Structure formats: structure tokens, C-alpha cells
Amino acid sequence: MRVVIAEDLTLLRDGLTRLLEAFDFEVVEAVDNGPALLPALLGHCPDVSIVDVRLPPTNTDEGLKAAIAAREAIPGLPVLVLSQHVEPLYARELLTDSNGGVGYLLKERVSDVDQFVQAVHQVAAGGTAFDPEVVAQLLARRKPLAGLTPRELDVLRHIAEGRSNAAIATRLYITEKVVSKYINNIFAKLGMPPSEDDNRRVLAVRMFLDA
Amino acid sequence: MMVRMMLRHRLLTGLSATADGLFATVLAVLNVPVLVLWVASLVLSPVPLLGAELLGVSTTVVRWRTDLERHLGRRAGVRLGRPYHPQPDDAEIGSRRWLRWIITDPATWRDVAWLLPGALVGVILGLVTVAIPAYGLVGTVLLPLWLFLGDVWFGYALFWPTTNFAEAWLALPVGLAILAGGLAVAPLLRATDVRFARLLLAPTRAAELRLRVAHLTTTRADAMDAQAAELRRIERDLHDGAQARMVSVGMTIGLAERLVHRDPSAALKLLAEARAASTAALVDLRHLVRGIHPPVLAERGLEGAVRALALSLPVRTEVTSDLPGRLDTPVESAVYFAVAEALANMARHSRARFAWVTMRHLDGLLSLEVGDDGGGGADATRGTGLSGIVRRLDAFDGTMTVSSPSGGPTVVTMEVPCALSSRRT
């Protein structure tokens, strides 16, 4: 799998490269500044990219801007955004259409290597991987999506964080069959017609972010 | 519609200027006894026991009178600052120090010098201000008056005396025109009166500078205090939080090092623990950073940061912003925390269902409004939150006002003079 990395701190950039290569990713380019990122993303059209929000020269949100611009040019281009802090606002900006392939994690999640690599795969496969912290911040503020029971909300939260049905089942100590029943309930309550389309998961996450 | 509103506005300003003119005339007449009182008490001031007290009282009366004039000036749209030296802390009324404070202040003498010419100008202009609309009003009631009294010696405007019905009838439109003209010139006359007062009652250049220095001294002290307290808080947070956790991480790893050959599984468990502790340290650091300078503020500027803030509130909050550039970092930070405080207060106390934030920058003035549809009754003088906002903004010559009638809505308005850099985010 071909990867583009954008990270300005050498230590982290090299660490990420080493880590990903150890898991059979091919790092096609590792950039250390904002202006070089967009051409790299559009030029390589990688299977997945890992982008730091804050990049030189301005050290503001150039990485995020480039990621959003690249996804506008190539819809569904898988991007996993890393940052020292997470903002629901940014999560919302990243996921503006029904195309998945979006991740947004705290940098420190890299230290849990297995879970991080799983998140990268999840994003590459067109899923979502939002940091539990984003989800928690969204849940903390107000009444979430109308009509969802606490259990259904739990399931939706795990979907946003990028877990498969099997993983959700183990987390919540229920069977996969029950999980898919919950998921169907969620889709029905959010007004999504039954279909085999995986986009529904992404759409449900988007509605969760926008609520 | 627009024209009607403008006319209405002109009518109201004209009426209020006329009323002010009447008030100013009455006050101007008062100048004479005030002057007599002050001069008399100045002459009597060497008299032991009584003299100093008397001068104190009469000076207070003079200042009360000139403050009223300054207030009228503000109503007429001319800002007149108070020019007086600040009262010495330990001086009691009538004491020697207190006397010196009064006598050495040039503003005292300028006040007194204004009393007589001020009265003259005030009475003349005030009477004209009132007389023109009053004469206009007479015109509007001349017709019934004329009918009632019959053609007698009196007349109106162009017709002296008023001899027939047509001439009496014409008094109505002529009177209305005079009334309108009088109301139109009333604000100008008021402004002229106030400009005259400004010659002597406004702070001189030196006094203005002195007032400015006094203001800067207080705000600088406040800012330094706030900064020192902030640094202490950061030090404490680091000491009790991230630092302590890193110490424990180091200890745990050291322990794992010793165990790694003898008991690899226990060492692994310790390493996992160390990783968890390092994550917790990062959480602490993140919270700390958010309190010092929120990353989203650095990345997105005021508008983006306030939008992010609005997203995290339990109340639906609409943010509208018209900021074509970025603010300087210190102002940006102060304003952001001020808005955050206002919004937090709103979320805590107002029981609002909807809130809004508007941000505008016009002619070097940043104005923000934080409002909600809650129960109102917020009091700016109570609670540390709002006074904290005032202190933060004061360092930049910014101001905050709260309008919160019982029953709502609550609107907090903040204004900070500052420049925008053209850099777009």
C-alpha cells in the first residue's frame, strides 16, 4: 500500500516511516511542509496519506487545508489527519460528503501501534476513524441525534471511531447479530433507506458530527 | 420606510436638543449664585475651622455643576472628559492636603473661569434654541386664537397685525415651517454651546496625558498581576500534572529494565503501564495548552476558534463574523478568552435555547456581541467572570457593557480598538 506522510518534526516523520514500513506500507513521499503537500497528494494519489494538521511555514492548519483541498480534487482520497489536539470543527470539515476514507486522530494514538495501523487500514478502505476524544467532545455538549437510545448511540460512537461489527461486538459484549440489528435501527432512525451500501456508515457518522 | 425612519430620528434628536436647551438655560442661570458662593468661600478660606470646609463644599458644588455640563455635552455628541487630578488617598475634606489638591489643580480655576461666560453663552443659545420652536408652536395655534379674540392688534410672522382670515390661516403652515426649522437647528445650537464649554471644561493636553498615564498605570499593574497569577497556575499544573507523571513513567521503565531478563511478562506489563502514564501526561499537557493559548486559535484565528467554541456548547450558537484579517496575537487571545467567558456564563446561568456571537471590525474598532434568549438578569458587577473580562480587555483600552433586563435577552457588547493585519487565514 502506497503512503504519503506529511509531518514537520523529523523524529516523528522518521518514526512514522519506520513504523509503516514495518507493517508493509510503501512510503512514496514524506514531506515536511505545507506547500509541498498538495502536489505530493495529487501527484502520487496514494492509497492512504498521513497528515499533520500544523505544518510550516505558517504553522497554522496548512496540513488540514491541503488534505481538504486534495479530497475536493480527488473525492474519497483517503486521508488520516494527526494533531496534538482535536476539534470537532475540523472533523466536520474533513467529512463533508458521503465519501469515507477520513481519519482524525490524536498524535499520541500512534503509541498504540496495533490500533493505529488498524485505523490506517480502516481509512484506506474508505471507512472512518475518529478519535474517541472527538466523539467524547461531541457527546458532552448536547442532546445527540434525535431518538437514538443510549445503546444505539454507543454503537454509532464505535462506528465513528472506525470499528468493524465484530470489534464492536467484542467491545460491548454482544453478538455480531445484535450489533447489526442496532445498526439497522440507527439507519432507520436517521432516515436512511435499507441498502447494501457501505456509504450509510459514513453518512451516519457525518450526521453524528453535524448534530 | 427609510425616509420615515430618518425623519423620525431627526424629530427625536431635535426634540431632545430643545429640551436640553431649556435645561441648559436654567442651569446657566444657576452659574451666577454658584460663582458667588465659590468666590465668597475662597475669600473666607483663611478663616480657621469654617473656611476650609466651606471651600470644600463650594468646590464640590462647582464640580457638580460642570459635571452636569459635561453630561449635557455627551448628550450633544461631544465628549468632555473629567480633567481633575485624582483625589489623594489619605486627604479628608477640609484638611490641608485636600485644600492643596483643590487649589493646585488648574482644572478648578478653569471651571470657575467658565462659570460666567458659560452662563452668558448658555442663556443666549439656550433661549434661541427654545424660542424658535416655541414661536413655531404659536403659529400652529394662531388660527383658533385669532378667531376667539377677533382681529386685534397682534399678528404672526409676515402679517402684523393679522387682519383677515386668510392671513390667520397662513400662520399654520408658516408656524409649522418655523417649528421644523427650529427643531433642525436645535442640535447645532446645542453643539455650539458645548463646544464653547469644551474650551475650558475639557481636559487640557497636559491633563489628558496625566489621565492617560493614570489609566495605563492601573491597567499595566492589572495585566502584570494577571500574568503573574497565570504563570503561577501553569507552574503548579505542570508540577502536579505532566511532570509528576513523567517521573512515574521513568520509574516504571527503570523497573521494567531490571525485570526484563528475570520476568519478561512482568516487564511487559510495566511497559504497558508506562505507556498509559505517558498518554495521561499528554492529556494533562493538552488541557494546559488549551488554557494558555488554544491551538485552534493559533491555527484559525479568532473566527475559527469562536466557531470551534460554539460547537462545544450545549446551547445552539450562531456565529457571524466580518473580520477581513487577523488580529495581533495578544488582542486575539484576550478577546477569545473574553468571548469564551461570556459564552460559558451564558451556558451556565441563562437557561437560553439560542445564542449568537457577532464580530465586526470597522474603522479600527473591533466590536463583538454575545447574546442569548435566556432569562436575563445578569449583573456585570457581581461574579468574577465578567470582571475578569473587563480586566482582560482593559489592558487593550477595550470596554464591555452588559444589557440584561429581567426576562432577557442578555447582550454582552465588547469593543476593542485595534488593527487588523491583512494576512488571511
Image: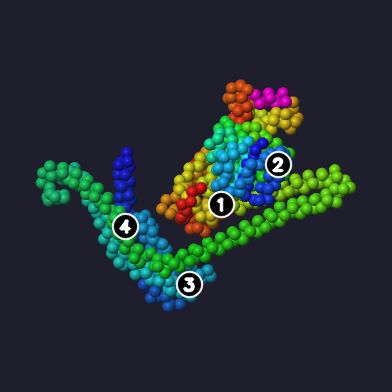
Amino acid type of the residue that numbered disc 2 sits on in the rendered structure: Glu
For disc 2, the chain is A
**Callout 4: few (<14), some (14-19), or many (20+) C-alpha neighbours within 10 Å?**
many
Q: Percent from the top left, x then y, of residue A111?
A: 72, 44
* Circles 1, 4 touching at the beta carbon (< 8 Å): no
Residue drawn 56% across the image and 49% down it: A60
**Are tags 1 and 2 found on a single chain?**
yes
Quick one: SS at disc 4? helix
Residue under numbered circle 3: B98
- In terms of secondary structure, where does tag 1 sit? loop
Mark 3 touching mark 4, by CB under 8 A? no
Indicate the position of residue A153 as horizontal and vertical percent values: 65, 31
**Residue indicated by mark 4:** B191
Q: Is residue B153 above or below residue B80?
A: above
Q: Mark 3 against mark 4, which lies toward the viewer?
A: 4
Q: CA distance from mark 1 to mark 2?
A: 28 Å
Report if residue A9 is visible in the image.
yes
Identify the residue position indicated by label 2 in the image.
Answer: A21
| Residue highlighted by disc 1 | A57
Residue type of the residue flagged with mark 1 = Pro
Mark 1 touching mark 2, by CB under 8 A?
A: no
Magenta segment includes A181 = yes
